[in-house]
Amino acid sequence: MKTITPTAANESSDATYLDVRLLDDYQHSHIAGAVSNCVFEVAFTDRLEGATPDKDAIYIVYGANEKSKEAEMAIEKMERLGYTNLTLLEGGYTAWTAADLPTEGTGDPPAEPNIPEGTHQLDLGQSYLMWTGRNLLNNHNGRVGIKSGEVEIKDGKLTGGRFVIDMTNIWCNDLQGDAHDGLISHLKSHDFFDVEHHPEAVLEIRSAKAIEDAPPGTQNLIITGDLTLKGKTAPVELAAVAGVTPEKQLAAQSSFLIDRTVWNVLYGSGKLFSRVGMHLVNDLVDIEVKAVTLPPS
């Protein structure tokens, strides 16, 4: 892949600059005369015909900085489409501005969304709790209904919360008919969750701590709390990917394991029964949670 320094690029009068960063970053500030086409959007290749129609012209492609790979990704896509004269701007836009070369734009940086302080209710239409259980040969997965939920925000940070889980509302995604109904009936029975006597489970969030230097899109929050299930309360800790939507909704997703026997869900446990044969069920259950708050009113 050909590269060029910002100073050398600025001396080239016959090249077109292609900015492949987010549109709002381009609008804030970009190389003077550059064309915008965000590589993260599915329409990137479709827009090339209008933005950069001449496949034999000279294009200098740039992203945010030396570490960010959007320019390299754009060049790979363009080469596959037949563009013949593509050059990567070394150091991206950060290097260009460090060299004090010509830029233009609104000068207004993209606003970071934030969530107001206080109690925020869960959006039950977007939030869910999924489970996966296994035995020696098979696995099943499904959902459990969330009856209600709320989180507490202070100084822009998650400080607490409470989720009420409807144990009467369990279903399986991979079975149908009698097989589905048989499994759900068994899960609701005394063998597993004893729903008749324990119709609800509760997850209480006690604290949340940010994971320092976590890249966007990775687990960035450690949440500790207590899970009450089948009448037993025990601590849980989970790592989540959390953030704030443009609509100022807190959104978090987490995938973690619990040992069901801690909560007296004992059926088929190999560590608690000397011989269970084909009734063996793994002690560990995969839990996947997505929590999204309602937009502030």
Image: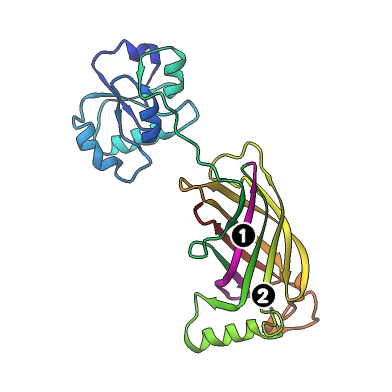
Which-is-in-front pick, marks 1 and 2? 1
Task: Of the two numbered discs 1 and 2 on the same chain, state the one appearing first in sequence.
Answer: 1
How far is the residue under mark 1 from the one under mark 2?
A: 16 Å
- The three-letter code of the residue at mark 2 reads Glu
Q: Is residue 17 left or right of residue 191?
A: left
- Of 268 and 276, the residue lying toward us: 268
- The location of residue 166, given as percent across then percent down, is 61, 74
Counting from the top left corner in percent of width and height, residue 249 is at 52, 51
Q: Which residue is mark 1?
A: 150
Helix, strand or loop status at disc 1: strand
Residue found at the far bottom of this picture: 178
- Which of the 4 image quadrants contains residue 257? bottom right
Say which residue appears at 42% left-offset and 27% top-offset: 108
Q: Residue furthest front?
A: 297
Name the residue carrying label 2: 200
What's the amino acid at mark 1?
A: Glu
Query: Residue 78 sits in which quadrant?
Result: top left
| Magenta segment includes 139 | yes
Q: Image quadrant for the N terminus?
A: top left
Write down the quadrant of residue 216 in the picture: top right
Task: Find residue 53 and report its horizontal and vertical position in percent.
Answer: 19, 32
Q: Is residue 207 above or below residue 283?
A: above
The magenta region covers 132-155
Q: Residue at x 62, y 64 (%)?
A: 287
Instruction: Provide the major secondary structure of the magenta segment.
Output: strand
Residue at horizontal 58 percent and vertical 84 percent from the top:
183
The image shows residue 244, relative to residue 108, as above or below, that is: below
Q: Is residue 214 above or below residue 229?
A: above
Q: Secondary structure at mark 2?
A: strand
